[in-house]
Amino acid sequence: MRRLLTLLAAGVPLAAALCLPTSASADNRGSASAPFNCATVSVKAPAGTEVESVTAIRQAGGTVYGTGILGGSVSDVPAYCEVTVTLTHPGDGDHAKVRTWLPAEGWNGRFQALGGSGYAAGDNGVGLGTAVKNGYAAATTDAGVGDVLDTDWALNSEGQVDTALLRNFADSQHEMALVGKQVVDEVYGKAASYSYWNGCSTGGRQGYMEAQRHPGDFDGILADAPAVNWDEFEVATLWPQVVMNEEKTRPSTCEFNAFNQGALKACDTLDGVKDGLVSDPERCTYDPRRLIGTKVVCAGEEETITAADAAVVRKIWDGSRTTSGKRLWYGLPVGADFTSLAGDAPFPVPAAWVASWVKKQPSFDTSTLTYDRFTQVFRQSQNAYDEIIGTDDPDLSAFRESGGKLLTYHGQADQLIPTQGTVNYRERVERKLGGSHRVDDFYRLFLAPGTAHCALKGKVDGLAALTKWVEQGKAPETLTASLTDASGQTLTRDLCRYPLVSHYKGQGDPADADSFRCVPPHRH
């Protein structure tokens, strides 16, 4: 917990990494004037649920402070109506709160639903406040579970997985969409003109679940760094700890950084210029063994990179495998920070998944996982939970036919969710639905060089791009983003539509997006 709070204070991995959903602004083309009723709101229960209570309170706005471990705040929020609907599934004993915030004035005619972070199914208030500030009526749900790192709900009183709550966590956003849209209709006296999903990490996974299982809920889905393939990648992100334990070698943070610096030095110019970024990590074939014997200074002490250090890094980058060498899942991307997954202790989210859901023993010590036991746990997770929370069905035909648009960015230095899992999903969709060109008509993926988990918040306006695609038919060819190079310098880049990659034109300032163009991979 101390490490997580330190990361949060540092500003990137936890708050960005466990994903506090915020919403970028969009234009007001969908602006609508309508009567505003924040007094009596009635809601029809979605199928399979009952409405336990409905409250409607007019809030003055101002500064909204985020609840829970992620905290955060948003200022200058206008007055809004806060409607809270509590649902239950008869027989399950759950109590899921759906919160909808609706601006008292200046509603842009749109509905925005917000996803969660870690084990939190919904927004902590900052995303809602930001959406209202930008003119949206916005909704989220807690699914009847807890905060980002709260897993007390995993097991029932008999020590078995509470499948009902897990299903809530996996797929609660559909009921939230139905309720939130009803609330909009009740408060404004008219339906929203367009509906959007906005989420990263857990929120990204929820967006993909909507496209897969409830294709008519949203006109547009912004689902970034998505935690799809949940039952696989959660176990796979314990692999670095298993490797270090089994190899009996734990490189220091300083030594890990030296390997990333070595990879950057070797692969930086693959995009045609030295710019402090590896624009196509899949082409980076840097071998960690090249650093063996190199001396680095860590906390004032000189250390020498050993063959054992290099072996650990090779295995972490390569990803989890069976003892016979068969790939299980993808590894930490080259260039991604090692601290979260290869730190002194396992990252809490995958550790809790294995302990509580797979092993059904909250106190289970994941450091006891050998290579053999790791494979067993990986298969257990797949077999038990893929149908519930895998969120990896490539058949998006119904979403395509509904006219929906799906937009995703994923950082290529994501330290928590292996980027290649998202690439793998996109490629499976292409195979299912007839190739890249046909899929691009409704689903576009953008990879962000050098970018950590959910770290583009506020640095790329994906929601505005999605809005133009949905409402004006202008599909994004690129997404303009502010990236940070290895030295901390801010660069402007046009993120390329997958599978294209960014390549230097041969002239111009490397910090300027206009100096680059998007080209097919491996054809520079």
Image (cartoon, rainbow, N blue to C red):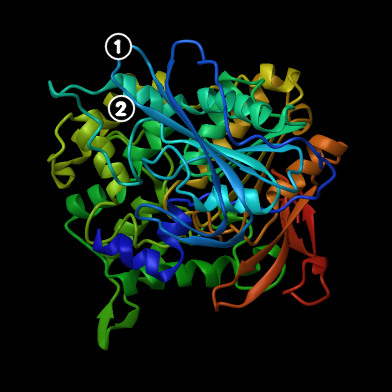
Quadrant position of the N terminus in the picture:
bottom left
- Rendering coords of residue 357 (x, y %): 25, 30
The residue labelled by disc 2 is: 381
Front tag of 1 and 2: 1
Label 2 crowd bin: few (<14), some (14–19), many (20+), radius 10 Å: many
Measured in 3D between alpha carbons, the distance from the residue under mark 1 to the one under mark 2, in whole angstroms, is 26 Å
Above or below, 349 against 378 in this view is below
Check residue 234 in the rendering and tell me which mark sits there, or answer none.
Answer: none
Above or below, 139 against 85 in this view is below
- Residue 387 vs residue 238: left or right? right
The residue labelled by disc 1 is: 91
Amino acid on which disc 1 is placed? Gly
Above or below, 240 against 374 in this view is below
Marks counted in the figure total 2
Q: Marks 1 and 2: CB-CB under 8 Å?
A: no
> Furthest-bottom residue in view?
300
- Residue 226 vs residue 343: left or right? right
- Rendering coords of residue 482 (x, y %): 67, 66
- Residue 84 vs residue 23: left or right? left
Residue 405 visible from this viewpoint:
no
Amino acid on which disc 2 is placed? Ser
The residue depicted at 83 percent of the width and 67 percent of the height is: 514
- Rendering coords of residue 213 (x, y %): 56, 19
The residue depicted at 69 percent of the width and 63 percent of the height is: 271
Element marked by disc 2: helix
